[in-house]
Amino acid sequence: QEYGDPEIIALRGSPKPLLPISGKPAINWWYDGLKCQIEGDVFIVTNAH
């Protein structure tokens, strides 16, 4: 199904963790919830096109 909304079209091909949810990337919601439990460095790897 094709969507004519330019905002939706701009997201085509974006890695799912980088898609916005309520104004910020999905990965930020996960990180914000876990950062108090993480000690050390965090590396985020995606399959960007």
Image (cartoon, rainbow, N blue to C red):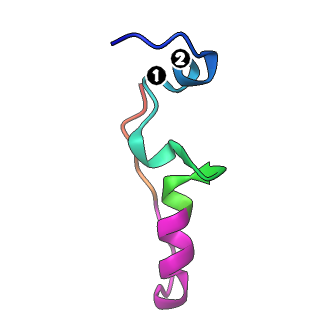
x and y, in percent, of residue 33 in the image: 51, 78
Q: Quadrant of the C terminus?
A: top left
Q: Is residue 46 above or below residue 10?
A: below
Q: Specify the principal SS of the magenta part.
A: helix
Element type where label 1 sits in the image: loop
Residue depicted at x 53% and y 17%: 9
| Left or right: where 8 falls relative to 46 | right
Tell me the residue that label 2 is attached to: 9
x and y, in percent, of residue 31 in the image: 51, 70
Residue closer to the observer: 26 or 1: 1
Q: Is residue 34 above or below residue 24?
A: below
Residue closer to the observer: 11 or 43: 11
Q: Residue furthest left?
A: 1
| Left or right: where 1 falls relative to 5 | left
Q: Residues within 10 Å of mark 1 (few under 14, many from 20)?
A: few
Residue depicted at x 58% and y 16%: 5
Q: Is residue 37 above or below residue 13?
A: below
Q: Of the residues shown, which amino acid type is indicated by label 2?
A: Ile
Highlighted magenta segment, given as a residue range? 29-43
Residue depicted at x 50% and y 54%: 26
Element type where label 2 sits in the image: helix
Q: Residues within 10 Å of mark 2 (few under 14, many from 20)?
A: few
Q: Is residue 46 above or below residue 22?
A: above
Whether residue 14 is in magenta: the answer is no
Tell me the residue that label 1 is attached to: 12
x and y, in percent, of residue 1 in the image: 33, 13
| Left or right: where 19 falls relative to 15 | right
x and y, in percent, of residue 36 in the image: 54, 89
Cβ–Cβ under 8 Å for marks 2 and 1:
yes
